[in-house]
Image (spheres, grey):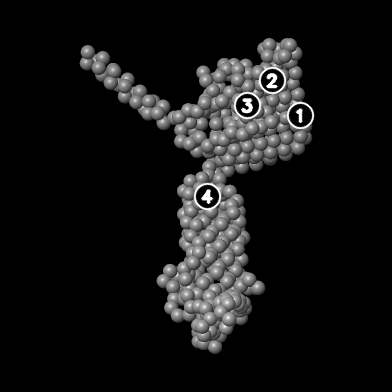
Amino acid sequence: MKYNILLATMATAMMLPAVGQAQEHKTKTLPDAVTEVRLEDYATLRVVQGDEDKFAFSGQLNEKSAQSGKGTRVVLNSPESDVTLYLKPGRSMVFNTQDFSNLTLIGDFAPMDSLVLHTEDYSHIEYKGDVTDTLRARHMRLESEDYSRISSTNPVQYGVGRYNAHDYSRIDLAAYDLCSRLAPDGVTNELYTNSDFGRINSGRFTKDGVLQHERQEGGYDEALEVTDKITSGIADMARKAVRKMNRHPWETELDFAWGWHNWGDQLGAGFSGVEGASAVSTNFHNIQLAINIPVINVRGFAFKAGLGLDWDRYNFQTPEVFFDASASPMTFAAGTTGSAVATSRLKTRCIVVPLKFEFGNPKKWHISVTAMPGLNWSGNNTGLRRRYNMVDPAGSGTTRKEKDYAINQYMNPYHLDVRLAVQYKGMGLYVQAATLPLLKDGCQELYPVKFGIIL
């Protein structure tokens, strides 16, 4: 009795990890209308035969559906998820891999009516299994381009076959069988085409089980052997390196920041403001727009360089403000207009070259630190602006606007801000501080600070 209890306890303990693992996986049905599965953005997928058409996955299944010319397409872009697709025997399908993605077909497959495997952009489709496993289809089409690969370590069997390899891509079959039982009306047919250094390697070839060739190379010029080895090596190294390093691909982005600003008389003290005629209100008048392109793009980190513009409009607390070039240091001074009500503001423009360091997952939480060197831009849209609300003797009101460009010559031509941003997906918050004063030497030192929303 004790021995039986011990065995039962051990069996239960051995089953617990498997049960826990099963609980971690989720499933989603593959609709009957789907005729194509496309992999993008470094996604990985396993395909096996099963009792029902479904995805089994851990983590998150990033997928979307779209209508295509051939019916309904499902697009997967889940580089981190462990995803397996189960297909019922006989289901026809198109598999399309792109962008360094990887698809693996595993095990024995009952004959499909149609199977299309298409690879491009350094992606890879591989078929493998036990020694008795075979991939079967009445109509089979293999197409590769742009340094991509289709390979098999197990036999494939079909009635009608088409192979196309282009642009330094390669199709490698360990063995294949041209089977009249799978061919329409028993008539078998196959066709090889390649171009631009594409290569098709066929292994052991049988026809209805009768050996025809041990090995052949379809549509390939032997004079290209050296070129093929070089380009194949480049493609394989690029695929392995990028797949290893770029599980969170960072993309070219358009940054739009919109927020509040103020300035202080010391570095990093912008929130405290200043006193006197130079004091401005904390207003929502900072706008920034920049395009950033990844220069270094690896898992969890990216360095981007870009080009952008920075618009600011500082509203003075003093109604009427001039720039006093005779003061020491030169600074803003209050004016006198009698009974007129005035508002004053300073408009600045800057061309910046953002140098951005990003950390995290671009599809989830990530932070960035950006150095923003640039040049202040002076012109008709910069300088001091004053608006006067006048009242004439008859009691009617008029508005008079003044554009004062005199301050432009005292603006610091150089700009260097540092920005910290925290984002979830495409939205977040930023805070930005100037490391150089807004005005030239000999003027009051004013260091702007900005904070707000970044998209």
How far apart are labels 1 and 4 at the CA level?
44 Å
- Which class describes the residues within 10 Å of circle 4: few (<14), some (14-19), or many (20+)? some
Label annotation for residue 35: 3
Q: Which of marks 2 and 3 is in front?
A: 3
> Which structural element holds mark 3?
strand
Q: How crowded is mark 2: few (under 14 residues within 10 Å), some or many (20 or more)?
A: many
Residue shown at 69% from the left, 31% from the top: 69
Query: Upstream in the sequence, badge 2 or badge 3?
Result: 3
Q: Would you name the residue on which mark 1 appears? A: 193
SS type, badge 2? strand
Work out which residue is located at the far left of the displayed protein and give it.
Answer: 2
Whichever of callouts 1 and 4 sits on the residue coming sooner in the sequence is: 1
* Residue 46 sits above or below residue 418 on the image: above
Amino acid type, residue under disc 1 in the picture: Thr
Image-based side of 276 in relation to 69, left or right: left
Residue 206 — which label? Answer: none
Residue 80 location in percent, x, y?
50, 38
Disc nearest the viewer among 1 and 3: 3
In which quarter of the view is residue 287 placed?
A: bottom right
Residue 154 in the image: x percent, y percent? 60, 22
- Tell me which amino acid carries mark 4: Gly
Q: What residue type is labelled 3?
A: Thr
Foreground mark, 1 or 4? 4
Q: Mark 4 points at which residue?
A: 426
Question: Does the residue at mark 2 contact the one at mark 4 (Cβ under 8 Å)?
Answer: no
Would you identify the image quadrant in which residue 166 lies? top right
- Identify which residue is drawn at 46% across, 36% down: 59
Look at mark 2 in the image and give the residue it sits on: 139
N-terminal label among 1 and 2: 2
Q: Residues at badges 2 and 3 in contact (C-beta under 8 Å)?
A: no
Q: Residue at x 57, y 17 (%)?
A: 89
Residue 178 makes an appearance in the image = no
